[in-house]
Amino acid sequence: MSEPRVRRAEIAIEQAHVDTVYTRLAELRAQAEAMRTKGYEIGHGAGREAIFEQASMLFERDMMVYHANQTLQTLDAEYEGLVFGRLDHLDNDHIYVGRLGIRDAEFDNLVTDWRAPAAAAFYQATAEEPMDVVRRRVIRCSGQNVLDVDDDVLIADAVPENMQIVGEGALMAALGRSRGEKMRDIVATIQKEQDEVIRAPWRGVTEITGGPGTGKTAVALHRAAYLLYRHRRQLGGAGVLVIGPSGVFTSYISRVLPSMGETNVELRALGEVLDGLEATRQDPAPLAAIKGSLRMRKILLRALRDTPEDAPEDMKIVYRGEVLRLNARELDKVRRKVHTAGGPPNRSRIRAAELLLDALAAKAEQHAKDDGRQIDKAELITELGERIEFHRFLVVWWPILYPAQILRWLGTEKRLASAAKGLLNRNEISMLAADFADRSRGWTIADVALLDELRVLIGTPPKSRRARQSIEVNPERGGAPTRPEHYDEYSHVVVDESQDLSPMQWRMVGRRGKYASWTVVGDPVQSSWPDPAEAAMARDQAFGLKTTRRRFTLRTNYRNSAEIFDLAAKVVAGHAEADELPRAVRQTGITPEVRPVEASGLEAATQAAVKELMGAVEGTVGVITAMDRVPEVEGWLEGLSDERLKVVGSLDSKGLEYDAVVLVEPNDLITESTTGRRVLYVALTRATQQLTVLASNPDWIPAA
Ligand SMILES: Nc1ncnc2c1ncn2[C@@H]1O[C@H](COP(=O)(O)OP(=O)(O)OP(=O)(O)O)[C@@H](O)[C@H]1O
């Protein structure tokens, strides 16, 4: 048979199996629906039964509804091709590999879940170590239709006569395809070096390093799905948290886990880790460097121990006809004494009241001594402690504190200078105070870590502490748990772009992973954080005492064409060891264009380049520029609004990718931060197919 006919015949064979799978899926769905309905009926009968029977019925109902909902959720996930692989073994048997395990009514396997041990050979078998696999087939589907098949032969001598072989490389085909707005899963083409990371043990800390486009993010997400599948009992209940650099990034990766049927993973951007906040704004580099450093912890601690802004400066109270008075210095002494005990202020008001009463008693004793009298101290404390005016004083002198309020106080240069003595210089103090004083633009991403630190330092007032609930499982939401505020019991935490976390951010994330194992993804060469040693220390503290640490390095760049990556590698040549740069596997024959442009002609040149690239690629086009130029460049492109087009600042482009990129003024990226070349390297490695650089100054590219 000719190649197209063989291909068509093989597609038809796989289509028949895929049809069987979908028919079975519909049956399973109907069964789960029926179970849910039955569950609800049990609940309705409960009114007429004895109390203990009611309770057990309600429990049974909840469990049935919960399980039915979970099954439906798994079955209803938006699978982009439920079946994607087939392994033909030496013993002439074969299995299908898919996003979900499915058995027929006789309990025979129709599809093996990709995470099951039996499917491991799909990713691990090679011609050198074929693991009894003769042919590995990738099946490409759109919905329920098989579009194509692609084979690897692993034991050439064992191919039986009736076995047909089709295709020339599913991986290359997948890499060459145009990109949409959201990242896709890679279950069908996970490579061996990636599979080892995905299936590494769950305990301890797993570090994944590697250059741009090596699949670190993809691998970390598939690892989360794998761990939940294999260790659901240990990890599922407490939950998995995935931290990414920005909301744009978490939105970009948001479809990957649901497409594998995994909905019980929380994705949070660094600006959203603290409940109730969604910060998206980046600070300019010098401010971010201060806000992220560990010096801030000391500053915050001193700030919250300072006298609150509206606190009264002295206290007067009448006891048995005599005025007892505490002046500012005496009150300060009491305040310091309360803080010396080290408790969070919002939990220390009782202690503050006790010490104030002690100070008042000491005053009364002093007066009495001067007059040659005696007083009963216990009686005084009881009587004054019950007085309404004492309580009125206490609530303003020792108010309940709020994190945002403390940062606002630091907007006063004098207050900040006192809290930052010996830690910040005068320039830094003015810059930071001016920033905290101006709240008109909302919080920045770096502020969120400060607010979270303050939340813990200040403590929860006793009443709201009591109101904290444990995890509630809501069966109506398909089992997705509603977690209490500031939940900190995740069983596994994934941190992406970890090279950029500041020490204060590591502290914030560490708080959520006190009991967790970790997967930490990063590339030091792409770092925009200026003090890696301090960040490494804070990171190690976040991991706690966990001793097992394994590290994997991915070395193949699957995103960029080799031509694009060659250019990117040049700009970090002096900032990276040769083995820190990955190898790009795909040649396109299209070299990136570097266009010299007059600064005055940038607008027109950007519009022209964008139009060209929109015509040249099918998928997304990203325009990357320095952070503070984003609104200006957006203005230039207003007339071209198109869903495929996005303007993004350098720091916000981390982790993203586009079919084509227009990079506007690379020199601006270098000068906007202390790690400018590394940020430029990030920007240059976002394109899968085409890159155009518009530069009014050639300094950004080192001379050959
Ligand atoms: N085995 C694979 N099969 C198909 N596509 C892959 C594979 N590995 C990676 N990719 C694709 O390569 C691109 C880059 O992957 P990813 O974003 O995970 O890389 P990264 O290492 O996190 O990059 P960066 O450090 O630049 O953020 C993505 O489009 C991803 O889907």
Image (cartoon, rainbow, N blue to C red):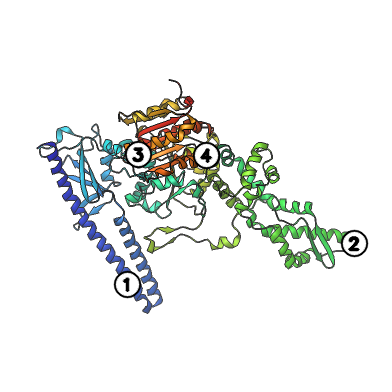
Q: Are marks 2 and 4 in contact (CB under 8 Å)?
A: no
Which callout, 2 or 1, points to the residue nearer the camera?
Answer: 1
Residue 421 image offset from top left, x and y in percent: 69, 40
For label 2, the SS is loop
Residue 686 image offset from top left, x and y in percent: 40, 36
The image quadrant of residue 433 is: top right
Q: Which of the two discs, 4 and 3, labels the residue nearer the N terminus?
A: 3
User: CA gap, disc 3 to disc 2?
Assistant: 94 Å
Residue type, numbered disc 1: Glu
For label 1, the SS is helix
The residue labelled by disc 2 is 372
For label 4, the SS is helix
For label 3, the SS is helix
Residue 366 drawn above or below residue 181: below
Q: Which of the two discs, 3 and 2, labels the residue nearer the N terminus?
A: 2
User: Which label belongs to residue 41?
Assistant: 1
The residue labelled by disc 4 is 628
Residue at the extreme top of the image, as rendered: 704
User: CA gap, disc 1 to disc 4?
Assistant: 60 Å
The residue labelled by disc 3 is 614
Q: Quadrant of the N terminus?
A: top left
Q: Quadrant of ligand 1?
A: top left
Tell me the crowding category of disc 2: few under 14, some 14 to 19, or many 20 or more residues within 10 angstroms, Cα based: few
Residue 553 drawn above or below residue 644: above
Q: Which of the two discs, 2 and 1, labels the residue nearer the N terminus?
A: 1
Residue 304 drawn above or below residue 574: below
Residue at point 66%, 37% (across, down)? 427
